[in-house]
Image (tube, rainbow, N blue to C red):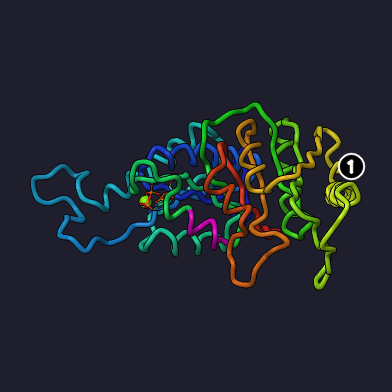
């Protein structure tokens, strides 16, 4: 039986090893979600005089355009190795990687990217395509980084915002399918304002506010535990900077899930500081959640 209908899982490939890692993860995600997998390579017509097609006498596989086709073919093969039943398509789309992938994300259930690509320089933590697409994509983005591991919990960052609730739903779903425990982390430095215009006291009792923060965590998770009784949930209430705490948690995790921005969402900011910290520094794959498509 060939599975998968609806919006695809999209993976961006550029011929790099990191992108092939992303393909393997994307294939498993597509299989689980019963979605087709769409492998995309964005191809920029070069301004140099490099031959696009084989020059006379050169092997038929020469030329940049052929190379682009090969990146896609190799990725499609890799996906089929992971999941032979999967419906996989591969395309080369003309255009710069970021706009092409952001456009693809409008119709995608999930976008999967490697943390690095062919370009960049040694020591670069994250490639520019991944940074830009993570900030702009309309669907959830899974960035594959760190050593793949099947043990360790799925970790989700909780701040009581709408997108953090989306992130919790996403994380429960992942924990259930991976048969992994879920760690729900709420880190706080100062009391959280719960509504617009909330005035916080200048001096506050840590015990009182610790209780409030705990309530926020418990209320945020309400309902999910009943929906996913098979998932073991651990609450972590930590006094510390949320980005730092989540990066620390990622050392033991198999996946970290955060919303694109949280309560502090400044108008115009595409990523909040916590998602930014996790994107750049997590030790394991991570997901930045936005409102997902329902179809
Ligand atoms: N041309 C492309 N088409 C499709 N996906 C791409 C393309 N380039 C990069 N990607 C995706 O983005 C991921 C990260 O690559 P990125 O280009 O951001 O890093 P880099 O090449 O190391 O650095 P940079 O390009 O910023 O110098 C890749 O693993 C791949 O998933
Ligand atoms: Mg690149």
- Is residue 192 depicted above or below 198 in this figure? above
Q: Residues within 10 Å of mark 1 (few under 14, many from 20)?
A: few
Instruction: Provide residue 231's location: percent of width, then percent of height.
Output: 80, 34
Q: Residue furthest top?
A: 151
**Residue 59 is a magenta residue:** no
Q: Which residue is depicted at the point 58% across and 57% down?
A: 108
Q: With 171 as the anchor, is 278 left or right in this view?
A: left
Image quadrant where residue 29 sits = top right
Q: Which residue is depicted at the point 59% across and 62% down?
A: 138
Number of numbered markers? 1
Can residue 157 be seen here? The reply is: yes
- Is residue 205 depicted above or below 75 in this figure? below
Q: Quadrant of the C terminus?
A: bottom right
Q: Report the residue marked by disc 1.
A: 226
Magenta segment, prevailing SS (helix, strand or loop): helix
| Along the viewing direction, whichever of 126 and 142 lies nearer the viewer | 126
- Is residue 55 depicted above or below 16 in this figure? below
Image quadrant where residue 260 sits = bottom right
Instruction: Provide residue 102's location: percent of width, then percent of height.
Output: 50, 62
Q: Which residue is depicted at the point 76% across and 59% down?
A: 161
Quick one: SS at disc 1?
Answer: helix
Q: Which residue is depicted at the point 52% across and 41% down?
A: 144
Provide the residue span drawn in magenta.
Answer: 131-137
């Amino acid at each position: 039986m060939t599975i998968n209908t609806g919006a695809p899982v999209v993976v961006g490939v550029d011929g790099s090893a990191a992108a092939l890692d992303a393909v393997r993860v994307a294939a498993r995600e597509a299989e689980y979600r019963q979605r087709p997998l769409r492998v995309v390579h964005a191809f920029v017509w070069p301004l140099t005089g490099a031959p696009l097609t084989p020059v006379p006498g050169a092997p038929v596989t020469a030329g940049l355009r052929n190379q682009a086709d090969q990146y896609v073919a190799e990725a499609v093969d890799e996906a089929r190795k992971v999941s032979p039943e999967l419906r996989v398509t591969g395309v080369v789309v003309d255009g710069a990687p970021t706009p092409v992938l952001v456009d693809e994300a409008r119709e995608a259930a999930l976008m999967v990217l490697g943390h690095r690509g062919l370009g960049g320089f040694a020591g670069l933590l994250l490639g520019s395509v991944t940074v830009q697409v993570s900030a702009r994509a309309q669907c959830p983005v899974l960035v594959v980084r760190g050593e793949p591991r099947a043990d360790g919990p799925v970790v989700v960052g909780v701040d009581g915002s709408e997108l953090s609730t989306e992130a919790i739903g996403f994380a429960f779903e992942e924990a259930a399918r991976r048969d992994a425990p879920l760690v729900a982390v709420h880190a706080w430095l100062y009391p959280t304002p719960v509504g617009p215009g909330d005035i916080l006291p200048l001096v506050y009792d840590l015990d009182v506010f610790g209780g409030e923060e705990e309530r926020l965590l418990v209320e945020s998770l309400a309902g999910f535990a009943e929906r996913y009784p098979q998932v073991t949930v651990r609450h972590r209430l930590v006094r510390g900077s949320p980005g730092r705490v989540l990066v620390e948690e990622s050392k033991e995790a198999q996946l970290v899930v955060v919303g694109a921005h949280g309560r502090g969402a400044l108008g115009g900011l595409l990523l909040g500081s916590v998602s930014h910290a996790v994107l750049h520094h997590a030790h394991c794959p991570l997901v930045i959640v936005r409102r997902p498509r329902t179809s």
